[in-house]
Amino acid sequence: MAGLVLWAQVVGAVPMTNDPKGFHDIAWGVALIARQDMEATRSGPHVNEYRLKAEAPSFAGAEMTSIRYVTVDDQFARVIIRYQGDQVHRRVLRYMESQFGPLEHIPGQMTRGLNQQYNWRGSETEINLTYQASTERGFIFIDSRTLAPRFNDQISDSAE
């Protein structure tokens, strides 16, 4: 059982100190289809993904592999950010703690592991950051707390 601790580090959700209520000045619930600065990258009957046309994907002052803006039933509900590299991960983690609240470090808790997971929860937004140290890949999901559960509705409706 102790070996499992080496494989994953999960930190409980930290109360968010600064809820962004969206991402990069785009509020949750906004329709992205009419935005001239975005283009669809994946379309479906209920869930659509977009990216910014002209901007290189960046977040926390670092270049990201990709940033996708996701809608459910034409309402902006999620951002998916992918990044690569340990230095980028450390920069992202510092930024997240400075913007959304410091992580609670419990005495004796491992601060690094092969898979690390961090969560911040605000009144309207929930952020989940996962980092896979073995491949140096990071994933950030920034979700609307009211709209993101509708993704599950679409999965259960289509899974027969």
Image (cartoon, grey):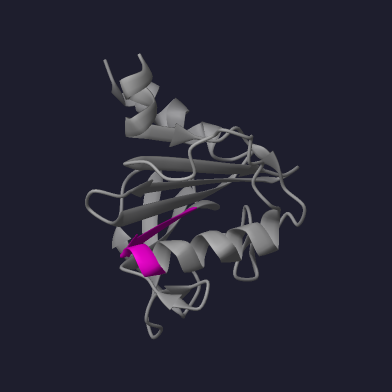
The quadrant in which residue 2 appears is top left
Where, quadrant-wise, is the C terminus in this rendering? Answer: top left
Estimate the x, y position of residue 142 in percent, counting from the top left.
53, 51
Residue at the bottom extreme, as displayed: 54
| Residue ID at (57%, 42%) | 119
Q: Residue at x 69, y 56 (%)?
A: 100
Image vertical order of residue 70 relative to residue 89, above or below:
above
Q: Quadrant of the N terminus?
A: top left
Q: Tell me which residue sits at (38%, 33%) in the image.
A: 8
User: Quick check: 51 left or right of 129?
Assistant: left
Q: Position of residue 126 (x, y in %)?
A: 61, 44
Q: Is residue 85 a member of the stretch shown in magenta?
A: yes
Viewer can see residue 70: yes
Is any part of residue 32 visible from this angle? no
Farthest residue to the left: give it. 135
Hey, which residue is sitting farthest front in the picture? 108
Direction from residue 55 to residue 24 in the image, left or right:
right
State the count of labels. 0
Indicate whether 91 appears above or below 142: below
Task: Tell me which secondary structure the magenta stretch mostly adopts.
Answer: strand
Pick whichever, 128 or 55, lies toward us.
Answer: 128
What residue span does the magenta drawing correspond to? Answer: 79-87
Residue 49 in picture, x, y percent from top left: 37, 57
At a point 36% along the width and 55% down the height, the residue shown is: 138
Q: Is 38 rendered above or below residue 42? A: below
Q: Horizontal and vertical percent for residue 103?
A: 64, 46
